[in-house]
Image: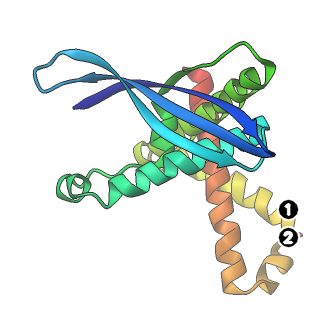
Amino acid sequence: MIFLGRTFSSDGTGHKNLNYNFQHANYLVTDKNGNKVHVTYFLGLQTSLDGSSEQAVNDWDDELQNIADIFDVSPLAQESYNFLQLVEIFVRLTGMSSDHCGKEKKDFKLMGEKKTAAVEQVLGKKQIIDDSTDELMPHYVHENQEMLKKIGGEVAWNALDEAAQKELKSAMLQNLTADLGKDAFEKL
């Protein structure tokens, strides 16, 4: 089965000071005969810390990461060397459905921001893979200079232990990827 697109839907309620959310994923898939078929998967009913949109998005992250983790240890993933990352799920998100309440609209907005960030991350990684060292070097130098400026310069850098330097370099590379992805996204 090939997943062509997906939309999410959810709703929540409260009972005796507990918040409950249920989630659905809606897919358009191609079956083994080549026919496109709509399917809906119930992702479950979970308790939530609160009824906020921010918590709803965290709940989506947790549920989708759980799905990715289960898939990644499955025989299908192991045999096909086809693993699933959370960012890939958000890249393929094509929409959400909900009722008309303001909270659900905020959920939609926040999920849209996650999708945009995921697309930018994928585009940034693609550019790092595809571009030559000469094309990437000015971006790398700029991000490195920004990192050094934030921590107080070369002297502060040299005073850090190796673990702290690695952590800062990792964050710098994530910023580089994000910036490249934002530029690529704006050009689309």
**Residue identified by numbered label 1:** 149
Residue 167 drawn at (x, y percent): 67, 72
Kindly indicate the quadrant of the structure image that contains residue 78: bottom left
List the single residue furthest toward the top: 100
Answer with left or right where residue 163 lies relative to residue 96: right
As rendered, which of 61 and 143 lies closer to the eye?
Answer: 61
The answer to whether residue 127 is visible is no
Residue 96 drawn at (x, y percent): 57, 21
Q: What amino acid is at disc 1?
A: Lys
Establish if 100 lies above or below 23: above
Kindly identify the residue that appears in the image at 77 percent across and 61 percent down: 147
As rendered, which of 106 and 79 lies closer to the eye?
Answer: 106
Q: How far apart are the two marked residues, 2 and 1, measured between alpha carbons? A: 5 Å
Question: Callout 2: few (<14), some (14-19), or many (20+) C-alpha neighbours within 10 Å?
Answer: few
List the single residue furthest toward the front: 16
Answer with left or right where residue 156 lies relative to residue 140: right
Kindly identify the residue that appears in the image at 39 percent across and 24 percent down: 5
Kindly indicate the quadrant of the structure image that contains residue 34: top left
Residue 143 drawn at (x, y percent): 71, 54
Q: What amino acid is at disc 2?
A: Gly
Q: Which mark is residue 153?
A: 2
Q: Label 1 near label 2: C-beta < 8 Å? A: yes
Answer with left or right where residue 95 lies relative to residue 171: left
List the single residue furthest toward the left: 33
Kindly identify the residue that appears in the image at 64 percent across and 38 percent down: 21
Q: Which mark is residue 124?
A: none
As rendered, which of 117 and 133 lies closer to the eye?
Answer: 117
Q: SS of the residue at dot 1? A: helix
Q: SS of the residue at dot 2? A: loop
Question: Callout 1: few (<14), some (14-19), or many (20+) C-alpha neighbours within 10 Å?
Answer: few
The answer to whether residue 80 is visible is yes
